[in-house]
Amino acid sequence: MQSMSFTDQARAAKNASRRLATASRAAKDAALNAMAEALLADQDAVLAANAADIARAEQAGTPASLIDRLRLTPDRIAGMADGLRQLAGLADPVGDVVRGWTNANGVRVRQVRVPFGVVGIIYEARPNVTADAAGICLKSGNAALLRGSSSALESNRAIIAALRRGVESAGLPADAVQLVEGGREVTAEMMAARGLVDVLIPRGGAGLINAVVEGSKVPVIETGTGNCHLFVDASADHDQALALLLNAKTQRPSVCNALETLLVHADAAPTFLPRALEALADAGVTVHGTPAVVAYSDAVVPATEDEFDAEYLSLDLACAIVPDLDAALDHIRAHSTGHSETIVTADLAAAERFAAEVDAAAVLVNASSRFVDGGEFGFGAEIGISTQKLHARGPMALPEMTSTKYLVTGSGQTRP
Amino acid sequence: MQSMSFTDQARAAKNASRRLATASRAAKDAALNAMAEALLADQDAVLAANAADIARAEQAGTPASLIDRLRLTPDRIAGMADGLRQLAGLADPVGDVVRGWTNANGVRVRQVRVPFGVVGIIYEARPNVTADAAGICLKSGNAALLRGSSSALESNRAIIAALRRGVESAGLPADAVQLVEGGREVTAEMMAARGLVDVLIPRGGAGLINAVVEGSKVPVIETGTGNCHLFVDASADHDQALALLLNAKTQRPSVCNALETLLVHADAAPTFLPRALEALADAGVTVHGTPAVVAYSDAVVPATEDEFDAEYLSLDLACAIVPDLDAALDHIRAHSTGHSETIVTADLAAAERFAAEVDAAAVLVNASSRFVDGGEFGFGAEIGISTQKLHARGPMALPEMTSTKYLVTGSGQTRP
């Protein structure tokens, strides 16, 4: 495969996508189970390849946190195989009739779900994404062109080899799953491949996502950076606010739906902030505050203005006091990345204004932003969380990996 | 307005979009009716402006067909006003709950329709598009940045002045509707305005659409060129096939869902083609055929290979004989623009294969491709026909002019 040009790979993917588009659910589920089995059967080869990637990363002085993301273990491989088997258990979105009607002249119209065709996924270090993305694409009837990180090249080669063998053993074309190798010029080719690649999905840091969104001629689904806010309203129940704050910040700080900024209504601050700052400190969170917040505790680090624009993805939290709901809405409007924004309030009017006026994929009232997730939404699979407004917004599962077409059926009707 | 920079206009549109996003249906409908009234009240000014555009176009030697598209009459203005009033009668997509559920922990999730925000529309000569597009955007809660053709500048200025007065008289912000003036550099600014413009929709010829799709950093909805095919299967009823052929080709040849290529099964050709060629000639259609088609009639002009790739948008038709359904599917796969493709057949298996395997916004069985239209689908309004797979595919009406957001409501639930 390494010797194929990207265009040849994309053509092979397009051909495979035609077979996938009309494959039955049973055929696709058999392939997913065979992919899981092949992955487990190749566990030693995958671990050996991963060890080579890790040795190379260590030699290059890669930070430990990135090496941890890169590392595969028998448990992680078992998790990848489980993920593939779970996909086999999910409903097939392809063929779903979204709506349908009969016109006055007897012409029947049905809008049905169909695969996109060829989906390109550009992602960073974690090699488990390779199996996830391949499985989600296959279940939704799409051929996958997987552009993994060069740091995970050996791991990805070994994983893809197993997955392709699984696909083929179930009678579907191996080219439904392909690894795209090469330098930056290959990413540029993917972004220019209008007509061969139907959709591109970048998964990773803000830099990668921006480069793809700005540079691609192929339609892109932007997955999200999350500079998520929690606003404690004057009327908030403080116990509830504290629980939601700690959960959203500390339950898993490295993910996009984790909390990054706390905004506190001025009326709530004198009683709520001292408790919150103490609890955050106990949980190991460093608070970066405006001068008004610093005044509450020596433990608060002064925040620079641009800290309110960035994701920490760590046990750090920006914090400001706002005079009222309008100021909270203004702050969120100015700094939000449109992912998940939360209000804690007992005031119905405040809850309704916040829900109506905040422009984000998800708006939460008295619930943790950590719930904004395909798994928590009960979708069973998630390819990412879209922060764009076109096509899909929020957690993207199997139906979001499809397009539709209209089937129009008549008995010779013509337009007068 | 002419002295404002594009960025200032886009910021004003963003501000207006916030008001629109929470405007009630009643407020938006009142604005649409007031826009219609203002347009009728300004009829003389609009006609005078249009006369100036037409004089300029005539001096520049513009072809008569383009001048006809540019021309406004009292009837066309009345049609624009009627269109705005009809929009007031349509259901409001904003606030629609697409789906919703309650999780085991009591957290309620609703997915609701919300406006995109700011929609940029880049379009060619017809000034009636100005009122249509403004109305559809306003009804769907979006602010509109309308980039019309320089050939229609005076007409568009007069129309927009009336529409803005109407919007304002109903208590909504005039900046909900803005004309974007200036040279090509302004189009480039629109395409680069990520964060200020939420969606761009190009409407016009293939050149314009390609330039926007390839150059834009803002997400684009591609509206369609339609190189539409009709395949007459071996089993087709010939009377039905003839009626569908003539309707799809001649009922309105200049539009994107009109027929451009006829494919005839070799078994049907000896009996069907002579009748079809005679009927097409009687209807004033010039047939451009492969040598096998030319052999049937002296009236058939030899077709070049690239004629099978282009839209005629006139009383011309490309024609080929294919040995079987597979060859028809191959031809369509090679030449289709993914708009609307038709089979005429009495064979259920052929109908089902065609419906499943043709990759297009609409696939028709024994019905005219002229039905692929927002009006014919009963949508009441149409901003264009999408030929892309992301977001919307096929006729786009009010719901297709919206995004969604998830509202997540709890009573303090945290993620374990």
Image (cartoon, coloured by chain):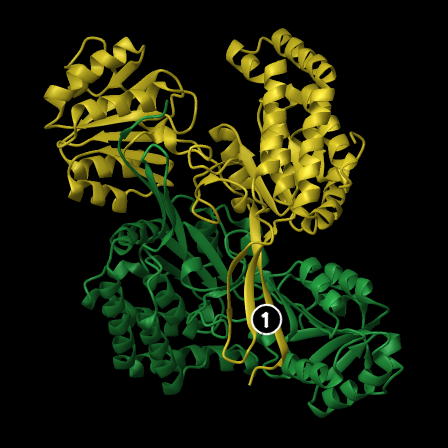
Chain colours: A yellow, B green
Residue A180 visible (yes or no): no
Please state which of residues A75 and B281 is positioned toward the viewer in this rendering.
A75
Camera-side residue of A215 and A399: A399
Residue at numbered disc 1: B256
Question: Would residue A48 appear left or right of A354 to someone viewing this image?
Answer: right
How many marks overall? 1
Which percent across, then down, holds residue B262?
Answer: 74, 75
Q: Residue at x 34, y 31 (%)?
A: A369
**Amino acid on which disc 1 is placed:** Cys
Question: Of residues B68 and A122, which is closer to you in this image?
Answer: A122
Residue A350 screen position, x and y as percent? 18, 41
Residue farthest bottom in this picture: B282
- Crowding at mark 1 (Cα within 10 Å: few <14, some 14-19, many 20+): many
Residue at horizontal 77%, vertical 66%? Answer: B306
Closer-to-camera residue (B59/B400): B400
Tell me: residue B278, above or below residue B389.
below
Q: Which of the image's four quarters has the N terminus of chain B?
A: bottom left
Q: Which of the image's four quarters has the C terminus of chain B? A: top left
Q: Residue at x 59, y 61 (%)?
A: B361
Quadrant in the picture for residue B209: bottom right
Q: Quadrant of residue B277?
A: bottom right
